[in-house]
Each structure stands twice: as structure tokens, then as C-alpha cells.
Amino acid sequence: MQRARTCGIMGNGIQRGLCLLLGVLMSAHAAFCPSWTSSQCPLADNTMTRFETELTENMAGQPQAFFAIRKVLAQNVAKFADRNPNPPSMLSATRAWKKLDNAVSISTVIDANTTSRAAALVENTLDYTMSYFGRKSSPASPKTPDRPLFMHFSGPTGVGKSMTADVIARSMFQSTFNSAQELCGRLSFLMNDFASQKPSDIKRNLAEIRKKVAEQLYHCPRSVLIFDEVQAVPEEVLDGTIDIFDHEGSAPLHFDGSPVVTSSCVVIVISDMGSTKLSPGMDRIAARHAVEQDAQERFTNSRKKALLNNVVPFLPLSVEDLAQVAVMELKQLNGRLAREYRGVWGGTITWQKEVPSWLAERCHDELTCYDDGGRGVETVVTHEVQSVVEDALLEECSQVSASDKVSYNNIHISVDEGAGEVTAAVDTVFDKKEFKEL
């Protein structure tokens, strides 16, 4: 309110116009996701801490990939933090211009010359806002816009590529979701949906991708954009998609008549290129070469395939990695059943120390399971292990007396080597009264 009163008493038209503009920009919140809700997508102020914590808790293996991602992400976060921790969006700048334009057009106390000078000064201020994000200040400007951070996650199924991309998005933004529980700062494309080779479909698909990217970045310039299964698309779609961020061969993005900044976002493309040539323990140089060679063979005529060389290889999981996945999945199983049986069961799931390794070796030795990577282990735990645990749990809960109501006994998982399966049995702890006295 104080800013509005100050602007109102200024006699100089230029000062009044600049005051209105700066008031809007300085008070602007982080942009929102317009096609969903009016919820904002504010940046997190501890991105790298969140990234490290979630990877440690939820990911297994891939030390080379995580080292490379950690390095470039930290540099990118620092780059934008140094500029401005809460940058204005193009939406804020556009609204500021419109407000100033209205204010100047209805003013009767300034002459045409003053209006012209005010507009020029404000346009320069808006131009600075645009150049903040790395966009050219004008068509005549010799400056080439910066590219966004661009990463290519490549490797076999179930090794953490998509999960890592999601972790990056969740780490960069505060936990604000739309009505569909989608993170507002994240936009994901399943590129299989754009696999048609028909020229008319290619044109339509590229237009759809450009439209969605423009809308997202117009409102949230620091968005994380994920293009999954990129190996499925025609070369024209690949080139057209990369052109959005490479600023060569396609028109700049616009949304609602305003230019869109593309240099502030994080772009992640995900593929299975090189997956048949990768192996656990392969060094990063050899892994990159395998992926790049596969990209060259698949996209023989692409103008943009060189950008697919920004490779972060995700290697097949070793038995040790699969055992880590098994531990994580068993912990998640415990959490799910604790929520499902709340009020009748207050125990926990425990397991013999050999169980994770046994599950890992079993999955490693079965081609179908191993081809699914960590998802294969997840499937075994979700279907087979959960089944035997719930059998024991239901039997235990059925025997709880009406007076006790809640069982605090644990369910212990063991390996029956002779039968080649896991088993689950009740592990008696305390009755309710004794448990509360501890």
C-alpha cells in the first residue's frame, strides 16, 4: 500500500511509470501453472541437500551417473542463485508492461515526449528482465541466447533414469502440486505418443510439444522438462524438439503473444540407447561411447543428434545393487502394510539378513526379472513377498482378542533354501500392556 501511495504522488511521468513497473516485479511471486490451478511453483532454497537426501534414501547403484548429475546440477543452481533467488517470470514482466501502458495512456499531465521516454526506459528494464534469462534483447542483438542445462539419461529399463529425473524436479521446487497431484514445476512427455512417421502427424506432434513447452515456461521459467523414451520418435521430431532450446532452425517460442524464455529450464531426455552394450562396472568413457555409437546408428540423418552426446550413462544393476533395491522395497512394504493395518497391527516387518541377497540373486538369474532391473525386484517383493507376509499378518490379526484389539507382534521374513522361497512367521514381542510399560 505504501508503494502505491508513493507512486500516486509522484509528479514525474517517467518516475511514476518506473515505480509501477518495479512495484509489480518486486512484489511478484514465483510463477504458477496456468493450465492446472493458480498454485505457485516456487523454487526450493536447498535444492542440493534435497537431491542428495532423496537419492540416498531411494536409489541404488549408479555412482558415476550421480556424480556427473550432482556436479552439473550444483553449477546450474549456483548460476541462477547468483543472479536472483526469486527471478521474475515473463508473466510478471508482461503484466508490468500492460499496467504501465495503461497508466501512461490515461495520464493527461505528461506530454507525448515524456510518454515516449518513459516507454523507452521501461522497455529497457523489461529487456533486462529478458536478458536475465539469457534471451536476446532484440532481433538485432549479436548475443546468442544461452542453452538450458541439457542432460541425456541413457541405459536399460529399471536402473533409475526416470526416478532420477523426478528427484531433480522435486529437489528444485517446493512441494506444490496441482489437482492431479503433479508437481507444478515439472512437465513430462512420453515420447512414444509422438512416434508416428506420417508427415501430417509429425507436424501436429511438434506443434503440440512446442505449445505445451511454451505455456509451461511462460509461467515457470525454471521448470524441469522431461522427454522420456526419446529413441521412439522420428528424427524430425527429435530435431524439432531440440530446436526449441537450441534456437537454430525454428522460430522462438511465444505464448499469448509474449516471448518465452527457454534458457532457464532444465531439459532431461531419457532413452535406452546403448543399453545392450552397457555392463555393470563399465567406466564412464566406455559407457558414453557405447551410447553415442548407438545414437549415431539410430539417428543417421538428424541435425541435432550431437546434443544427445550430453550423456549420463545409467549402467545395468549388479547383484549388490539389486540387494540394495530389495532392502528399499522391503522397507516400503513395511510402510504400506503399517498404514493398511493401522488400528489392528502395531508391529513391524523384519527379515533374515540373507533375504535381500537371496532376492537379488534370484532376480539376477531370471532373464525376465533382470531385464526389468530394479523394477524386477519391486515386482517380486510386491507380489510374492507381500503375499506370504499378509498371510501371516491376517492369521495374527484374527487371533487378537477383543480386549487387546491391537497386535504388536512382528512379522519375520526368512529364506527356505530347500523350497527355494521366502516364508513369513509371527515373531512374538510383547502383549499390549507390557509393550506400553517399556
Image (tube, rainbow, N blue to C red):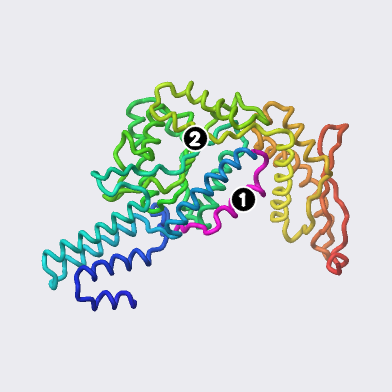
Q: Position of residue 232 (x, y in %)?
A: 47, 29
Q: Quadrant of residue 247?
A: top left
Q: Which residues are magenta?
A: 40-62
Q: Quadrant of the C terminus?
A: bottom right
Q: Classify 285 as above or below 414.
A: above
Question: Circle 1 — which element?
Answer: helix
Label at residue 395 = none
For the residue pair 71 and 57, the one nearer the viewer reads as 71
- The picture places residue 314, in percent across and down from the top left corner, at 60, 34
The quarter of the picture where the N terminus appears is bottom left
Q: CA distance from mark 2 to mark 1?
A: 22 Å
Q: In the structure shown, which secondary structural element does the residue marked by tag 2 occupy?
A: loop
* Residue receiving disc 1: 52
Q: Which quadrant of the view contains residue 397? A: bottom right
* Mark before the other along the chain sequence, 2 or 1: 1
Q: Residue at x 34, y 78 (%)?
A: 2
Query: Within the magenta stretch, is there residue 74?
Result: no
Residue type at mark 1: give it: Glu
What is the x, y in percent for residue 279?
65, 27
Q: Residue at x 52, y 58 (%)?
A: 44
Looking at this view, is 316 or 118 the one in front?
118
Q: Name the residue carrying label 2.
A: 310
User: Please, what is the three-letter code of the amino acid marked with disc 2?
Assistant: Asn
User: Is residue 47 highlighted in magenta?
Assistant: yes
